[in-house]
């Protein structure tokens, strides 16, 4: 039982419970049941359920219900295909605006990613912070916001990759390669590294989901 908490804490806890299979697949989630389970009123439950639907963690069930959204190979493939096209694009717009301060922030985030004992959620958040700090320099808010939405939809897959596919080591290596190319002002090389980084992760994930889910 969780004591009374703000909606943000409830949101974090429910995402973790989905990852830990504490909220069962294929079973409608009732607001009353969740209210009792988490020790909060129905208002934050309703708000968090809607937020989790928007981010792809839940799907609609019935008129007002929700269910945990199973990992889906086709959805994962679509998300990573979109990322592999849009992220090198925005990186091109950002390139001329990247400076030592931005590169330094990105480096600091990569160092945080190497700390032992990170939760899946923290790792996913830091991963987006790394990419986001580079992309924000493009000053393309519409493009940036769409990429941000894709990362939110990918977040449950990113956690799954690190847990089931041991992807973190390769991911970090590619992150440093990307930063190195950016520091040398090698835009084409940086875009190629980024596209390959996203595409290969997507291919590995889709293959695993097709074979095991």
Image (cartoon, helix red, strand yellow):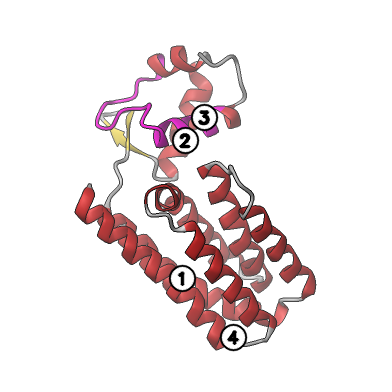
Q: Which residue is mark 4?
A: 187
Image depth: mark 1 or mark 4 in front: 1
Q: Which residue is mark 1?
A: 197
The answer to the question of whether label 1 and label 3 lie on touching residues, with beta carbons closer than 8 A, is no
Q: CA distance from mark 2 to mark 4?
A: 36 Å
Earlier in the chain: of badge 4 and badge 3, it is: 3
30 within the magenta span: yes
Q: Which residue is mark 3?
A: 13
Within-10-Å neighbours for mark 1: few <14, some 14–19, many 20+: some
Q: CA distance from mark 1 to mark 4?
A: 15 Å
Within-10-Å neighbours for mark 3: few <14, some 14–19, many 20+: some
Q: Is residue 107 left or right of residue 14?
A: right
Image location (x, y in percent) of residue 39: 52, 13
In the picture, the disc for residue 106 is none
66 within the magenta span: no
Residue at the location (57% across, 64% down)? 144
Quarter location, residue 129: bottom right
Instruction: Provide the residue span drawn in magenta.
Output: 10-32
Q: Is residue 19 left or right of residue 168?
A: left
Earlier in the chain: of badge 1 and badge 4, it is: 4
How many tags in the picture?
4
Q: Secondary structure at mark 3?
A: helix
The answer to the question of whether label 2 and label 4 lie on touching residues, with beta carbons closer than 8 A, is no
Q: Which residue is mark 2?
A: 15
Q: Secondary structure at mark 1?
A: helix
Q: Is residue 7 left or right of residue 34?
A: right
Within-10-Å neighbours for mark 4: few <14, some 14–19, many 20+: some
Q: Is residue 170 left or right of residue 111?
A: left
The answer to the question of whether label 3 and label 2 lie on touching residues, with beta carbons closer than 8 A, is yes
Q: CA distance from mark 1 to mark 3?
A: 30 Å
Earlier in the chain: of badge 1 and badge 2, it is: 2
Q: Secondary structure at mark 2?
A: helix
């Amino acid at each position: 039982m969780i004591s009374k908490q703000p909606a943000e804490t409830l949101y974090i806890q429910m995402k973790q419970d989905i990852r830990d299979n504490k909220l069962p697949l294929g079973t409608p989630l009732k607001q009353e049941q969740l209210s009792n389970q988490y020790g909060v009123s129905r208002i934050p439950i309703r708000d968090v359920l809607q937020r989790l639907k928007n981010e792809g963690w839940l799907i609609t069930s019935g008129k007002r219900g929700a269910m945990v959204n199973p990992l889906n190979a086709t959805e994962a493939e679509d998300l990573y295909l979109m990322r592999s096209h849009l992220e090198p694009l925005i990186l091109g717009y950002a390139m001329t605006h990247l400076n030592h301060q931005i590169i330094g922030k990105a480096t600091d985030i990569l160092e945080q990613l190497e700390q032992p004992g990170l939760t899946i959620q923290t790792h996913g958040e830091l991963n987006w912070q790394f990419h986001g700090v580079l992309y924000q320099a493009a000053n393309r808010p519409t493009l940036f916001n769409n990429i941000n939405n894709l990362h939110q939809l990918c977040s449950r897959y990113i956690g799954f990759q690190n847990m089931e596919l041991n992807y973190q080591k390769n991911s970090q290596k590619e992150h440093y390669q990307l930063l190195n190319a950016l520091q040398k002002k090698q835009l084409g090389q940086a875009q190629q590294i980024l596209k390959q980084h996203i595409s290969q992760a997507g291919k590995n994930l889709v293959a695993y989901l097709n074979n095991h889910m």
